[in-house]
DNA sequence: ATCATATGAATCAATAAAGATTCATATGGT
DNA sequence: ACCATATGAATCTTTATTGATTCATATGAT
């Protein structure tokens, strides 16, 4: 199984929408957020009594989702490039949650799931390190930096797509080319 | 002249610090922000009476700074790679403002300087397009996408540096390699 | 049709933050 | 030492947001 399975209780839709709304308007009022996801303030209240509860719930959810994203990418695949493709596809599929978690990274650190962060980063770091050892990823950039670059390219492209600057179709391929090969032409860039 | 000149009235320091603080804690209270930059709430109040005023002032400042960043990079240089190097160096130098503006992009759109955005993006788009026409940048990625990728790589690396995941030294070179050549090894990535 | 449940609109009290002011003190130039 | 100016701490009012409740209505299953 390579795709991230959908959650059972279908809060997933609502949670993803709320994640997106919170990234769009981090300082928006609870009413703003409710309106943004198409429910009333009262219903949002019944879902989460306080803003803190909402955020920590989204963080918990996001942590699970991104853990699944990594899990389902099967990073231990003998072919790092295949694993990377699955990783990209899964992240793009979970774009709202991904954007939210990267946005609220700081609160993840101080929150309950304080060491999940190191887990997630650690798994990616390890993945890129393995790829480096196999000669697939360049070694003059640290594995940690590769993780950062990979994440920011993906988030940046997804954001560009939301702003209408980048076409939705072919995002996965675009991300892959941008991350793996860069913007330069081989002869010039070398 | 290739470096971005410092502002005359030395609000620059304060403005940059405030920009950083606002990126760090977007929902921070005015008192939080004041403390974060080492001044009292009263002084911050004298500097900007309202939060909106503070933000629009930072946006104005940021717009000017980033315009200078682009201006001083001399993007019409016959060698796009040299121009890109200056662009990177200038952006890194103005990291706080850069991060702030990209973070508050949305408010730039709705604000006064509504068309500056298109100017700035437009200039970068045009720069990458020229580079593509010269055969320096790859043509299977749109110039707009190149702009997005370039910006997110830079911001992502700067953010990684702030979080202590990436060494400060060599950031410029790292950004250049990551953006131009990508993470893959030539033979494999092709 | 009936019932249970979910939702929305509106209201309200409690709270937090913003906006504004005062006064005492520190700082820097002459 | 003296003055002008800038800053900080504390206070206060006003405003906005939160957290909570009520009631009327919609929805869906049986």
Image (spheres, coloured by chain):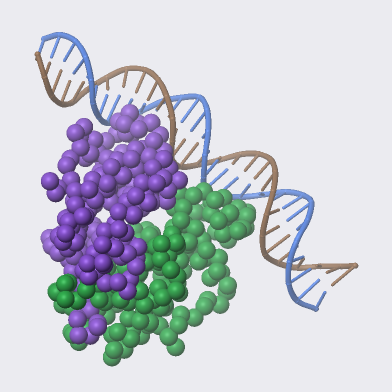
Chain colours: A purple, B green, C blue, D brown
For the residue pair D29 and A28, the one nearer the viewer reads as: D29
Residue B86 placement, left or right of A69: right
For the residue pair A6 and A128, the one nearer the viewer reads as: A128
How many marks do you count on the picture?
A: 0
Q: Residue at x 41, y 45 (%)?
A: A114
Q: Is residue B151 visible?
A: no
Q: Is residue A83 above or below residue B96?
A: above
Q: Which quadrant would the C terminus of chain A be assigned to in this image?
A: bottom left
Q: Is residue B123 visible?
A: yes
Quadrant in the picture for residue B2:
bottom left
Quadrant in the picture for residue A41:
top left
Quadrant in the picture for residue A142:
bottom left
The x, y position of residue A103, in whole percent, is 36, 53
The x, y position of residue A66, in whole percent, is 27, 48
Q: Is residue A121 above or below residue B131?
A: above
Q: Is residue B63 above or below residue A19?
A: below
For the residue pair A61 and A131, the one nearer the viewer reads as: A131
The x, y position of residue B101, in whole percent, is 39, 64
Residue B84 placement, left or right of D11: left
């Amino acid at each position: 199984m390579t795709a991230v399975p959908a959650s059972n209780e279908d809060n997933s839709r609502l949670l993803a929408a709320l994640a997106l709304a919170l990234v769009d308007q981090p300082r928006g009022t609870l009413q703003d957020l409710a309106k943004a996801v198409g429910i009333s303030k009262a219903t949002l209240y019944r879902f989460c009594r306080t803003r803190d509860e909402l955020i920590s719930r989204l963080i918990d959810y996001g942590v699970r989702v991104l853990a699944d994203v990594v899990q389902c990418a099967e990073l231990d695949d003998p072919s790092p490039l295949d694993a990377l493709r699955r990783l990209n596809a899964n992240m793009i599929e979970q774009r709202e949650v991904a954007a939210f978690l990267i946005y609220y990274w700081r609160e993840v650190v101080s929150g309950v799931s304080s060491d999940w962060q190191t887990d997630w980063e650690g798994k990616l770091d390890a993945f890129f390190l393995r790829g480096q050892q196999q000669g697939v990823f360049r070694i003059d950039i640290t594995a940690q930096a590769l993780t950062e670059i990979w994440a920011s390219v993906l988030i940046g492209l997804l954001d560009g797509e939301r702003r209408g600057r980048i076409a939705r179709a072919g995002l996965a391929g675009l991300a892959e080319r941008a991350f793996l090969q860069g913007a330069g032409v081989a002869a010039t860039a070398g």
